[in-house]
Image (cartoon, helix red, strand yellow):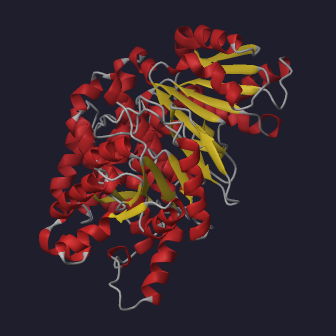
Amino acid sequence: MERQVSNIILAGFSATGKSFVGREVARRLSWGFVDTDEEIVKQAGKPISEIFQQDGEAKFRGLERHMIKKACQQKKTVIAIGGGAIVDSQNYKLLARNGLIICLEAKPETIYQRLFRDAASTPETEVRPLLSDNNPLERITNIKASRQPYYAKAHWTVHTDDLSISEVAEEVVRAWELLREVYPERDSSVTSLPQNDKKRRASAHHNDKGKGRNDTDKDIACEVKTTTQNYPIFVGYGLLDKLGEKIKQTGLSGTVNIISDETVFSIYGHKVGEIVKHAGFEVNSFVVPPGEATKNTDFANRIYDFLVEHRAERDDILIALGGGMVGDLAGFVAATFLRGVPWIQVPTSLLAMVDASIGGKVGVNHPRGKNLIGAFYQPNFVLADCQTLTTLSQRELTSGWAEVIKYGLILDEEFFKFLKTNAAMLMKLEPDVLTQAVARSAAIKAQVVTEDEKEKGKRTLLNYGHTIAHGLEAATQYRQFLHGEAVAIGMVGAGKLSQRLGFLSPAKAKQHQSLLQRFDLPVSFSKIDLTDVERAMELDKKARGGVIRWVLLENIGKAVIHSSVPRQDVLAVLQELLQP
C-alpha cells in the first residue's frame, strides 16, 4: 500500500515532550500542529480525566480515533498523539499510512521526575493520574512496558532523557529529512499484535550525545540495551538463511564454533555450517547429548578442551544452536573461556526463543540446584527462526507455550487476551500469528532486561512460577519434566498461592489455569516427595537470607514480589498440586 509521507506523528509515553517538541518542529518546518489530546478536551469541554471518570475509557478512545482520523487528513502537519493511542490497531494503521511515526522515548525514572516537577511547579493544575498511585514509578514502569512493543514500531526513536526541547526537535527534523525518501512504501495492514512488520521499517536510537543510529533491518523485532552490551533480536520465518550475513553485519570476523545437541545438530547442523561457510567463515562444531542433565561443569570442561584443541582465540565466535540448555551451556563457556568471547544465540525451541536466549543469563546446574553456577553475559545478537519450531516434538513445543503465557500473566493483560483468542492458530503454528507471539514475547523480555540486567528488581518478575518449577526439576534430577512443563505447574501453584493470600480473585485464578490447560500444559504432578521439592525450593537462586522471594499475581498482567509467605500456605498449595 502506498504511504503518503506528508505528516510527522509524535508518539510516546506521557512526559516525553510530544506537545512542546511538536510545536517547535512545526515552527521550524513552517507546518501546522495538532495535539489530539488538546482537541479532545476542546470537543468534550472537560479534561481527559473527567472523560474517563464520567464517560468511561471507551468514550475517550472513540474520541481519540475520531481526532486522529481528522488530523491525518491534513498535509504538512506535526501530530502529537496520546501515550496509548498507538496501541489501537485502527489508529496505527491510519498513522502509518499518512506520516512518519517518531517515538519520543524516556526512562521511567525520567518520566516520573518530569511529571513530579510539572505537578510541583503548577500546583493549580490537576495532578496526573499516574502520580496518584501509591507507587507511581512502578505504575509508570508497568504501563510503559506494556506499550513498548507498539512504540517499537515507530520509524525512528529519539531518546529524550538528557536533551532539551530544541535538541529533540532538531533530531525529529533530521529524522524527517533522512527517512521521507527511505520510506516511499509501507504495508499498513495491522493485526492485533503489530510487532512483526512484513515491509521495511527503520528504527533509530538516540545516544546521549545527540547522534542517531539508523537501522533499517526489517528482521529486528526489538533490542536489548544494557550497560555491557546492546544487541538486536531478529525474529521471522526462514531467518536461518540470513545467519551468515547477520554475523558479518555485526562486525564479527573470527572462526565460528557451533555448539549444539545431537538432536538439533542432526536437523540443522549441516545447514547452519554451510550458511556460515558461504559467508566466508571457518567453522568447527561440538555436539553434546540432549537434555538438562548435560548442563553441568563436566560438559563445560569438554567444550573448553575442544576450543583449546582448535586453538580458539578471543575474537572467535560461539554459536549456541538449540534450545535453552544449549544456550545456557554455550553461553557459560563463552563468558568464561579466555575471560569472554563473542557468542550468538540461535534458539530452535519456543521456550528458548521467548525466554532463555534473551538477557544473557548463562550457567550450569549443580546436583543440588538449577543454575547455581553462572553469570550474566549478553550475546552479540539473537536470531529466532520460527520455522524451526515445525521440527520440534509436540511435547517440546507445548512446553514452550508456558513461558509465552507467563508474559501475559505477569506484565501484559492484552497479550494474555491475544493468546486466548488465537490459541488454536498458535498451536497449529500458523506463521503470521506465531511470529507475532514470539516477537511480542521477545519484546517484553527485552524491555525487562533493559531495565534490570542483573535481576536486582523488575527482572525477578520473570521468575513467576519458577520457584516451584525449579523445586520440581531438582527433586526429580531434571529427568521427569521439561522446563516449560515444570513452569506451568509452578505458575498454577503461584496462582493458587496468590488466591490463598487474598491477592488474586478466584475468577482470575480460574482464567489463569484455564489458558494453561487450553495449551495442553500440565497443572499438577504426582509421585514426588514434597519434602524433596521444598528442600530444593529453599536452595533456589531467588532466595535471600534463607527466605524465598515469591512472585505472585495481583491481577492478570500485574505481578508483585512477596517474601513473607507463610510456610503452611506453601505446603498447602503443594499438596493441592500433588495428585494421586
**In which quadrant is the N terminus drawn?**
top left
Q: Where is residue 158 in the image (x, y as percent from the top left)?
A: 56, 56
For residue 5, say whether it is visible.
Answer: yes
In the picture shown, does residue 234 fall above or below 103? above
Residue 111 vs residue 465: left or right?
A: right
Residue 292 vs residue 8: left or right?
A: right
In the picture shown, does residue 245 fall above or below 123? above
**In which quadrant is the C terminus drawn?**
top left
For residue 540, say whether it is visible.
Answer: no
Q: Position of residue 546 (x, y in %)?
A: 53, 62
Residue ID at (51%, 30%) = 219
Q: Where is residue 319 in the image (x, y as percent from the top left)?
A: 66, 25
Residue 314 vs residue 353: left or right?
A: right
Q: Where is residue 570 in the image (x, y as percent from the top left)?
A: 34, 57
The residue nearer to you, when weighing 116 against 70, is 70
In the picture shown, does residue 38 fall above or below 252? below
- Residue at the far bottom in the pictured view: 124
The residue nearer to you, when weighing 293 against 324, is 324
The residue nearer to you, when weighing 72 against 551, is 72
Image quadrant where residue 383 sits:
top right
Image quadrant where residue 434 sits:
top left
Residue ID at (65%, 9%) = 274
